[in-house]
């Protein structure tokens, strides 16, 4: 059970992610704890796999580890489910303070575009704040690690939490021919990719994308929703 691998309740919010985000996700072949390590050199990850291979379970493990290990003052999450819109409902309904926004799927592209533009605006605001701290102290502040190093000492501005962005079903951006991989509707791609590219250029601490081509209930579903066409 996942509860056995979460941090003890009396130690909730006790971890600090000034240098990097550590997310335990399981046990390796030698029986040792295996963790994801999001840092300035490895700030994002893409998860892929066959239908029913455990992608959603991994995603929830990452979220639960993040919201129990780190306080909302140190790490906040933005969650987007681009298809079916059910994976993240429980986090918003429970009022988890670390989860700042949840986008459930909608066929309305404007909603998804607004969400991604908002995330981009957060990055731009932080870049401006980094420059402000650098100008005030005469030190180089170009990323969140340098911000913590300088601002934790100089206290120029209130501290900022890190941001963990998790996008489930990002492959639904490829609305089109599943057999050939042909893209017949690029609205979501056009809306999302510039933001994702921009985030990568800013050395974000973590971008996690999860996807498959559809829900699987039968062997026929498994065959037609295979990710091979875009692998």
Image: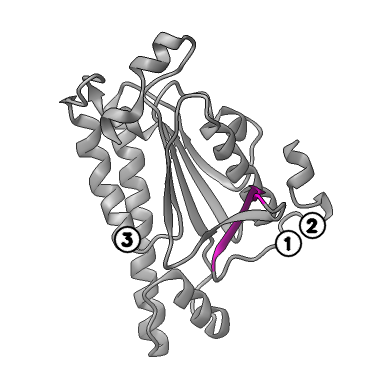
Q: Is residue 24 magenta?
A: yes
Q: Which residue is mark 3?
A: 124
Segment tinted magenta in the rendering: 20-29
Q: Which is more toward the observer, 206 or 226?
A: 226
- Residue drawn where x is 56% and y is 84% of the image: 153
Query: Do the residues under discs 1 and 3 have CB atoms within 8 angstroms?
Result: no
Residue 211's spot in the image, x, y percent? 41, 33
- Residue drawn where x is 54% and y is 32% of the image: 56
Classified by dominant secondary structure, the portion drawn in magenta counts as strand
- Residue drawn where x is 54% and y is 80% of the image: 155
Q: Which residue is mark 2?
A: 11
The residues tagged by marks 1 and 3 sit, at their Cα atoms, a distance apart of: 29 Å
First reached walking from the N terminus: tag 2 or tag 3: 2
**Is the residue marked by circle 1 packed among few (<14), some (14-19), or many (20+) residues within 10 Å?**
few
The residues tagged by marks 2 and 3 sit, at their Cα atoms, a distance apart of: 33 Å
**Is the residue marked by circle 2 packed among few (<14), some (14-19), or many (20+) residues within 10 Å?**
few
Tag count: 3
Query: Do the residues under discs 2 and 1 have CB atoms within 8 angstroms?
Result: yes
Q: Which residue is mark 1?
A: 14
Q: Say the numbered circle drawn on residue 97.
A: none
Q: Which is more toward the observer, 228 or 137?
A: 228
**Applied colour scheme:** one colour
């Amino acid at each position: 059970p996942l509860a056995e691998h979460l941090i003890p309740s009396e130690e909730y919010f006790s971890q600090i992610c000034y240098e990097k985000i550590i997310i335990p996700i399981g046990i390796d072949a030698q029986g040792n704890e295996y963790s994801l390590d999001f840092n300035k050199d490895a700030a994002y990850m893409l998860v892929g796999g066959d239908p029913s291979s455990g992608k959603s379970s991994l995603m929830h493990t990452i979220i639960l580890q993040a919201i129990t290990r780190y306080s909302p003052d140190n790490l906040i999450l933005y969650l987007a489910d681009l298809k079916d819109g059910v994976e993240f409902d429980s986090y918003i309904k429970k009022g988890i303070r670390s989860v700042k926004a949840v986008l459930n799927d909608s066929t309305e592209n404007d909603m998804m575009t607004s969400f991604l533009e908002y995330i981009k605006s957060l990055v731009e605001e932080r870049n401006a704040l980094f420059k402000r701290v650098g100008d005030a102290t005469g030190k180089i502040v170009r990323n969140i690690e340098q911000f913590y190093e300088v601002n934790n000492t100089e206290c120029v501005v209130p501290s900022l939490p890190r941001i963990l962005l998790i996008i489930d079903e990002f492959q639904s951006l490829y609305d089109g021919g599943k057999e050939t991989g042909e893209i017949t509707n690029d609205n979501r791609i056009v809306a999302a990719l510039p933001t994702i590219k921009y985030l990568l250029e800013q050395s974000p601490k973590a971008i996690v994308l999860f996807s498959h081509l559809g829900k699987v209930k039968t062997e026929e579903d498994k065959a037609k929703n295979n990710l091979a066409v875009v692998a």
